[in-house]
Amino acid sequence: MDLLITILLLLVCLLLSNVIGHYIPFIPTALIQIALGILLAIFANEMTLQLESEWFLLLFVAPLLYNDGRNFPREDLWRMRAPILGNAIILVLLTTLGGGYFIHWLIPDIPLAAAFALAAILSPTDPVAVNGIAKRIQIPEKILNLVRGESLINDASGLVAFKFAVAAVVTGYFSIKEALFEFTYTFLAGAILGLILGVIITQLRFTLRKKGIHDVVFHSLLQLLTPFIIYLIAEDVFHASGVIAVVVGGIIHALVKDHTETLIAEEQLITENTWSIVLFILNGVVFLLLGLNIPLSMTETLENPSMNNWKIIGYSIAIGFVILGIRFIWSYAFSYYEYKKDAIQEIEKPSLKTSLLTSLTGVRGAVTMAGVLSLPLLVDNGDLFPERSLILFLASSVILFTLLIATIFLPLLIDEEEVLEIREGKLTFNEAKKRLLIASIRKINSVMTEENQTVAFELIDEYKLMFNQIDVELNAEKLASKERKQQIKGLRLLGLKAEKEYIERTQKEQNLDPDIYSACQAAFKEREKNISNPNRPKVIAILYRILLHWRTSRKRYSLNKDKRIEYFRQKKELRMRALGAGIDALEQHAKSEENPDLANSIIYEYRKIMDRMKQSVTQNSERRDEIKEELRALLIETERMEIQKMYEAGEIERAEEKELRRFVNYIESISLYEVIE
């Protein structure tokens, strides 16, 4: 039960971190998750989540690396194979050796093998951790591709080096000859097993389909289980590197997917959506666990009389600078080597700024935390793992340090004028999305008829809601937002005033039924309150509607059937004519305005209310659904044409064009979806 509560709390914190991240987008989500983990540890100090090293690697590292291999962008990254392999293998080795010796020199209490283990697990980079920063600044695509490419391999090489260093600490024995032999065996055997198992599982899926098993949920689950199967077989049966095996297995899956994705499109869609949820949980929980373990590891570390707060913080900063410093020196040296080697001079001249950007994007994250949390509690002779709590705290602190440094300094290094020049004349994704929605609303208005009017109004409401959500995402200026709200308020009051004047004229001319007149006056009063105070609690408006309904019900039951019908007919006709007067006033106002869009939007609201009042008989449900599908199909065609126009006109890039098409496809999928028992 305690384990279940812990998992639920972590998932709640994971959701909370994204809500907080929406309001403070300048802070990466990973940092928010670490902070929530720390708060969770402080306020729920009895909550712990201890996992054995193999379990941790299986549950977190295997699926994360398999996904990296699965999404390996081969064409782009093949051109960058030299810097990627250099960063993923040579830089990992340099970081392990250089960082290990520095850590042991700085903190002699940490044995050399344990220092190598800490440096090795600090060598892998995490593109997910830097994505939160990349969303708000324009990091060069080449640098992001480099980080993504190297992380696919350096996760594996760093974890293999980490496991050897940990084994040396646990057993107390280390031989370079044996280590090289075992490293070669585990690496090659892991790669071969990943290849073989990837092919076998792929063949199994095709065989099952030939046998008539086409259940997409079954095949999606099989894909999700694949990294766990590969990892367990490689590690437990052949004692090879499960990490390398899942990476190769992911690449095999990607190669097969390229040739079959159109044949199994439904399966691919379900699998990708499921993977996005799994990865969201795994990445988030790792950072929450990082924060959860910081207070405990810090407390245990401070129990050492030779340690204090400032000293261990100083150690963390020093190690962070050395790790990033090694990366900076390597990045500049390798780019300089490539520049000199390229006789045609196609490669741009190396600069300190580019090398610094490359260094700062090397943020440490999930794999580092997953690895360091897997450190065993005991060594073979039964003693405690040397300085385990200190190593855990230092790894956590260095992750925090790299995240903070990247958050603060990457925006300062990006030339905003350069980015604006590149984006000049281009629409952002949200701007292009708004263009799509406007085109759709115009199309609905152009094809609206008496038959499809009700459904058309519903669709316009949907698109207006999406439009408003985009406005929120774009973070429009508060002043402009206030001015717009004031204009809308004034237009609504203008329409209401015209309605009230019409009712007053009718009362003088025709002497209306006292109950109808008083009901209209009460309704006007309530609407005026809602317009003047839009932040008024909704519950008050709901209670008032209930009260009006109750008063109407009393009137209904006090009359006979014929008088009841006549009463409601008069009330409905009067209400329709009053709404018409409001529309006339708003149309007159729109003619005098340079930009009548706001007035037209209020007129649309009036017409929607009138349409609902006209629907005396409920429209046939099947016919209504049929009309909605026809309109939706027409809108989807309109949206796709609009996307193509924007792309051909050069207003959007290829990435935005693909994302917009994906957005339209999602809407189409929902409209076509039917529950099948």
Image (tube, rainbow, N blue to C red):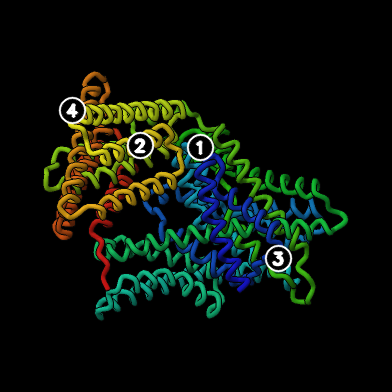
Q: What amino acid is found at the position of numbered circle 2 in the picture? A: Arg
Q: Where does residue 354 sit, x and y in percent of width and height?
A: 53, 36
User: Mark 1, mark 4: which one is toward the viewer?
Assistant: 4
Q: Which mark is residue 527?
A: 2
Mark 3 or mark 2, earlier in chain: 3
Mark 1 neighbour class, 10 Å CA radius: few under 14, some 14 to 19, many 20 or more: some
Q: Which mark is residue 46?
A: 3
Q: Left or right: 537 with respect to 361?
A: left
Cα separation, mark 2 vs mark 1, equals: 75 Å
* Contact? badges 2 and 1 (CB < 8 Å): no
* Contact? badges 3 and 2 (CB < 8 Å): no
Cα separation, mark 3 vs mark 4, equals: 77 Å
Cα separation, mark 4 vs mark 2, equals: 25 Å
Cα separation, mark 1 vs mark 4, equals: 95 Å
Q: Where does residue 610 sit, x and y in percent of width and height?
A: 20, 41
Mark 3 neighbour class, 10 Å CA radius: few under 14, some 14 to 19, many 20 or more: few
